[in-house]
Image (cartoon, rainbow, N blue to C red):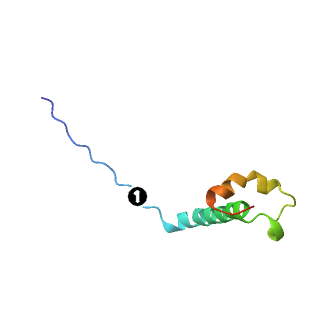
Amino acid sequence: MATISATPTAAPAPIPLQQIAPWAAYGAVLALLLFYFVGAEQGITAVFSGEVVHEFVHDGRHLLGFPCH
């Protein structure tokens, strides 16, 4: 029989918070922007006139539970 020797595995190094914070802030802003366009882009708060954005995200509105009719 052949002997099998266990090789040591390296433990993952933790990522410092200073490296995660900018990406987390960017992700939060992007998520809020997407949430605005899916959930509130119509009526008086509309950034774009017309129904283009509303029709583009219409199914997503219903999927997330936003009323639109």
Q: Which residue is mark 1?
A: 13
- 19 sits left or right of 68 in the view: left
- Where does the N terminus fall, quadrant-wise? top left
- Name the residue: 15% across, 30% down: 2
Q: Hey, which quadrant is residue 27 in on the image? A: bottom right
In this view, 55 is above or below 2: below
Which amino acid lies under the numbered mark 1 shown in the image of this protein? Ala
Q: Residue furthest left?
A: 1
- The location of residue 58, given as percent across then percent down, is 72, 54
- Name the residue: 72% across, 54% down: 57
Q: Hey, which quadrant is residue 49 in on the image? A: bottom right
Number of marks in the image?
1
- Name the residue: 67% across, 63% down: 66
Give the structural element (helix, strand or loop) at label 1.
loop
- The location of residue 18, given as percent across then percent down, is 53, 68
- The location of residue 62, given as percent across then percent down, is 66, 57
